[in-house]
Image (cartoon, rainbow, N blue to C red):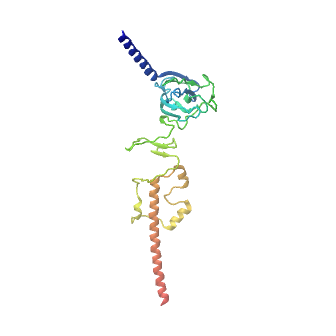
Amino acid sequence: MNFRKFAGSIVAAIVVLLTMSLSANAQVTGSFNVHGDFDKFYPVQFNDCNWDANKSTLLEIGRSSAHLNGDWHGSLMAKFRYHVTKWGHGSNFIDAEINQENYSAAKPFVAGYEDCSGTSNNAVIVIWLRGNSTYYFSATCEVTPQVYDGIQNLLPYQITGAGTLTFKTEKDAYVQSSGSTNSRPFSIMNIAPSLMMGPLSIGTMDIKGYMLAVNGNAVFAKVTVKNPANWPDYVFASDYSLLSLQELDNFIQEHKHLPGISTAAEIKTNGQDVADIQVIQQQKIEELTLYLIKLSKELEEQREKIKTLEKKLNQ
């Protein structure tokens, strides 16, 4: 009899542990509609329901079928991990991983996101989602979506103790149409080489076809430009056609810049290729060297003529 009681206690304990484990790993799923106009993004509020559990909240928003809400309406797979500040406790962040495709308008579904806890006890964030669309979600706790599209809840959205938010017509610059965005600085501690196959932009979303685009100042310990085309050793070739100083002066008077050098207006519009300007400047340095050598020879000839004249005068 005692054995049966003991066995029953063991079974009960296992059931409790399994229940606790399942509860801890439970996923809350559901769907919601954002009404309004397809060309607008409306604020949708989500709770930071893990705030009191001392861990971040993980929210996934998706629409697998591109034909949901209409032919080629678009697809979305997005993941948000976040922790709000809630009266300034800090350690707050919103990290987003977004992959989306909108075939009909070539526009994204996510336009922005914001911590709206601020100076209140409301542990919430807002994500701006495209109108006239259905979304499915999965979360690690009760995120309780609240849609502010002017129909389900009125606009503007009121941040407790702060300002208001309304719809957007374009996505914010920090939102990746496809990719990941971290709200905090990051460091890469890796002694092995790292590989990036695509372009990298810093401070700008307009990459303009370059592999690296920087909107701002940059400091380098050393820069090497490899394989500049047509390095101007040809300037010292015997058949090189060097302008006379008079021809050079005429060109400068007419054009207000050296031959082969871009104008200020062209530089302002198109920028300047560093390798190209190094080649051109080297060409000008070598041409200047030839001018100096030529002038030096002419001066030497004049000195000899002056010496000859002085000898004749002194005879």
Instruction: List x then y, in percent, for residue 119.
Output: 61, 32
Q: Is residue 56 above or below residue 276?
A: above
List the single residue furthest toward the bottom. 315
Q: Is residue 291 above or below residue 171?
A: below
Instruction: List x then y, in percent, for residue 99.
Output: 47, 31
Instruction: List x then y, in percent, for residue 163.
Output: 64, 32
Say which quadrant the N terminus sits in. top left
- 231 and 77: which is toward the camera: 77
Residue 192 sits in which quadrant?
Answer: top left
Residue drawn where x is 48% and y is 67% of the image: 244
Count of number-bearing discs? 0
List the single residue furthest toward the front. 2
Residue drawn where x is 44% and y is 70% of the image: 293
Residue drawn where x is 56% and y is 27% of the image: 44
- 270 and 176: which is toward the camera: 176
- 217 and 70: which is toward the camera: 217
Instruction: List x then y, in percent, for residue 126.
Output: 56, 30
- 77 and 14: which is toward the camera: 14
